[in-house]
Amino acid sequence: MNLAAVVLAAGIGKRMKSRVPKVLHPVLGRPMLSYVIDAVRGISPRKIVVVLGRGRDDVKESLGQVGVLFAEQKVQLGTGHAAGSARNALAGFKGNILILNGDFPLITSKSLNNLVKKHIDGSADVSFLTADIADPSGYGRVLRNVKGGVEKIIEDKDASPVEKKITEINSGTYCVKSGFLWEALKGVGSGNRQKEYYLTDIIEIARKKSRKILGVKSRDGSEALGVNDRAQLSEVEALLRKRINDSLMRAGVSMVDPGTTFVSPDAKIGADTLIYPNTYIYGNTVIGAGSSLGPGVWVQDSVLGKGVTVRLSSYISNCKIGDNVTVGPFAHIRPEAEIMDGAKIGNFVEIKKSRIGSGSKVPHLSYIGDAVIGKDVNIGAGTITCNYDGFRKHETVIEDDVFIGSDTMLVAPIKVGRGATTGAGSTITKDVPEGALAIGRAKQTVIENWSRKPREGKGKK
Ligand code: UD1
Ligand code: CA
């Protein structure tokens, strides 16, 4: 199949009232545009051209995807002009060109495939995806003749009151024969309410030239929903969330309240995992079977094993957690932390770029940064790895079976040997050999009969 795709993403996105380009606004933690590109990738076109304008460097950076070509639309003169901006990138290409808006993240590869298939099977010159939706306001309407053939697309702003009543809308997804596309675009003018070059005009041009047009109605109207403002963004996100959560629940994941459970389409969650409300599972996160998360937990781009418990108000990002680990409540597990099987991270604990060996415990109020901690270590409450001297970060090494007393300051670089102990309240500045006890605190002094007695005539009022 000789197919290329053009994604229109150069629009200003005025209605978003944002400094961020519209197509970068996130839906479940991922830019809106990336969903459209994924759907396109799913049907394997020869080339994908993304037309960018405002904020193009930010868009390119955020996509960071290989195999996508970029074209620039310097001034945003409308969707017809935007499609024309992809012409150089497709020089020499002959076949069908799929053109889509970058602002409708619910579109699926299945629908795109269906459109392309109908277009080819029907030997059409131009086909486009339509949908019947309850509230068509804002969309271009599909005008059909008495026989059901498509006559034209009329934009909301240009539609008469009668035309505005039409509920069949244009989703902004077209499959066009390349020869006809470039020829038709030459005929698109800007004589409309918005003074823009409308891509939608190619339909009327096709009709006037007696070319074959197919308006393919999608079964699931939600796929056609575009995002022009933030209210629509939240509606689309809610629909996507439902789509993802329903499929997870059918695969054996329990959600106490799917309405307040936010899972990225890239996340994988094992069966018998229970998710409490207000929990976010974003990015490429993997969670093993039989785990429990929440309420109020955020997990981003992390891999969690089986039987993991993450309790109330914990935040986990870019780290690796083994099987049967417990985290929280109120824990902060920062990038490059690795918590091995059976370890326990308790309340008010922050772990950064550290490995915590299997069976080790950091149960209360600690900061562990740039540390390598062995197996079966106990870190007492209030322990801090003093990893930063104001200039550089230094490493703390704690070997297997160490017992760190409560409120120990470990001034890095430092090493505590296997089986060693530190006394509570110690500031440890020198390495501790295997099996030793290190105490680094002022000796207690006791001064007898120190209590202040009220002196006569003073202290009393
Ligand atoms: C467009 C369609 C409308 C359809 C709707 C579906 C036109 C004229 N109208 O309207 O029929 O019902 O989508 O959601 O096409 N863009 C550019 N350069 C531009 C202008 C827009 O790249 O100069 C891009 C935008 O980034 C966006 C897409 O094209 O991704 C659609 O533009 P938008 O302004 O949102 O069009 P709508 O008014 O929604
Ligand atoms: Ca739009």
Image (cartoon, rainbow, N blue to C red):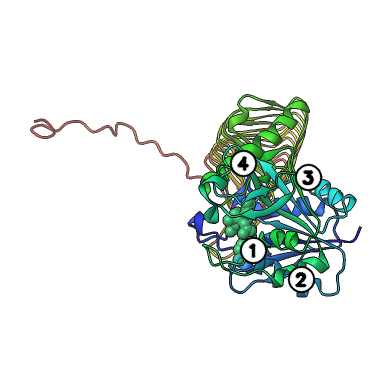
What residue do we see at 78% from left, 45% from top? Answer: 111
Q: CA distance from mark 3 to mark 1?
A: 21 Å
Residue 444: give x, y in percent of width and height: 45, 39
Quarter of the picture containing the N terminus is bottom right
Q: CA distance from mark 3 to mark 4?
A: 19 Å
Which is more toward the observer, 209 or 304? 209
Vertical position of residue 368 compared to residue 393: above or below:
above
Which is more toward the observer, 354 or 31? 31
Residue 325: give x, y in percent of width and height: 71, 33
First in sequence: mark 3 or mark 4?
3
Left or right: 97 in relation to 78: right
Between marks 2 and 1 in the image, the one whose residue lies nearer the viewer: 2
Indicate the amino acid at tag 1. Answer: Thr
First in sequence: mark 3 or mark 1?
1
Q: Which residue matches tag 1?
A: 79
What residue do we see at 61% from left, 50% from top? Answer: 26
First in sequence: mark 1 or mark 4?
1
Indicate the amino acid at tag 4. Answer: Thr
Q: Which residue matches tag 3?
A: 111
Label number found at residue 209 = none
Question: Ligand 1 within 8 A of label 1's CB?
Answer: yes
